[in-house]
Image (tube, rainbow, N blue to C red):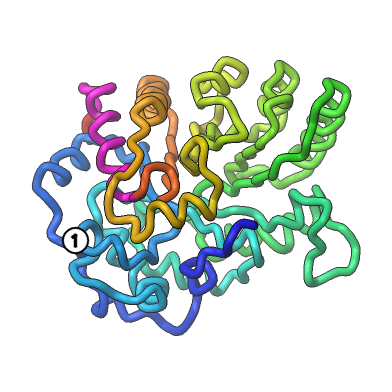
Amino acid sequence: MRRPDPSQLLLFGDEPDPARVQLASIDSELHTIGAKLLQSIRLGTSSWSFPGWRGIVWESASSTAVLARDGLATYAKHPLLRTVGLDKTYYKPAPREEFARLRAQVTDDFRFLVKAHEALTRHDVVAASTTKSVYLDPGYALDAVIDPVMQGLQASAGPILFQFSPMGLRTAKDAEAFIRRLGTFLCALPIGPLYAVEVRDRALLRPSWASMLRESGAAHSYCVHPSMPPPSVQAQTVDPITQPAIVSRWMLHAGLGYDAAVDRYEPFDRIVDADSASREQFARLCAVAIEHGKDAWVIVNNKAEGSAPRSVELLARAVVAAAPTASS
């Protein structure tokens, strides 16, 4: 069973004191790379509250609780970290006030990727506010997710991500039925926010999936996850050029479960299992975004290679190499 991330459970709390957490000494090369990246290329991590990032993001060691409350403002000062994924909202919706508190801690050019509540994407989860299923319910999505995000984060809102766990879709009939239902849901959502969808069933990578996304205006989330083919294969079905923005997440190293990855990679202070193939594919997606004037998000998890900020450093170098003419 997937263990809850304690840093996400502590994401919101008392008023933060940014002075308690100082930025590590950042190599001048990383500042140079950050200056070469277009502002539209947003690299970041899944949460930020990891004491093991000492010397990488944090100047000194701090507890998970201190970093969860006080670390975001420091995280946002890093020259390469321009976005962050909020996973806590997948387990419990957050009110507008909590998003507003996060927005107040970052600069105007920082953006958040927010995961929608799992009750919207799983049949077996019931929202606390009701006794009936709200699976793919546009009304619940608006009230519990979209309105709080947009009112609280305002211009700092990035993609709202609907993540679907493996559904065991095997037949074309099952895949097409889900695609139709999801399309109806997405088309019922208010225009304005950027919606992204991440799935874990290979059977959905079919022409009708790409057509549904175009018609609804939602983005496909190109993910690295053991249950899905590589982003380059996903891009054969969903051409990144057709996307409203390029949204991607580098989640879990091949051959590892979530718990096994945590055990292998903690304290997340170094690259343990380098995945140069995935890095190259994300760099190419960013290059496509630069070439076609699109925004791009890449959210990296510690469980991808061992240390998310170290992965971001390597990815940033690869993006600059793939698009050498890009400059801010």
- Whether residue 171 sits left or right of residue 15 in the image: it is right
Q: Nearer the viewer, residue 122 or 42?
A: 122
Query: Which residue: 86% across, 30% down?
Result: 177
Q: What number of labels is visible?
A: 1
| Stretch in magenta | 307-326
Residue 269 in the image: above or below residue 162 = below
Neighbour class for label 1 at 10 Å: few (<14), some, many (≥20)? some
Q: Quadrant of the N terminus?
A: bottom right
Q: Quadrant of residue 315?
A: top left
Q: Residue at x 39, y 66 (%)?
A: 49
Q: Which residue ends up furthest to the left in the rendered image? A: 28
In the rendered image, residue 255, in percent from the top left (x then y), is placed at: 52, 37
Q: Quadrant of residue 220?
A: top right
304 or 21, which lies in front? Answer: 304
Q: Is residue 293 visible?
A: no
Type of secondary structure dominating the magenta stretch: helix
User: Compared to 269, does 205 lie above or below?
Assistant: above
Decide which of 26, 203 is in the foreground and name it. Answer: 203
Q: Which residue is mark 1?
A: 55
- Residue type at mark 1 is Gly
Instruction: Tell me the residue at 24%/27% (across/down).
Output: 326
In the picture, measured across the screen, residue 205 lies left or right of residue 266, that is right
Residue 44 is situated, as x and y percent measured from the top left of the image, at 38, 48
Quick one: 60 or 161, which is closer to the camera? 60
Query: Where, by quadrant of the figure, is residue 272 drawn?
Result: top left
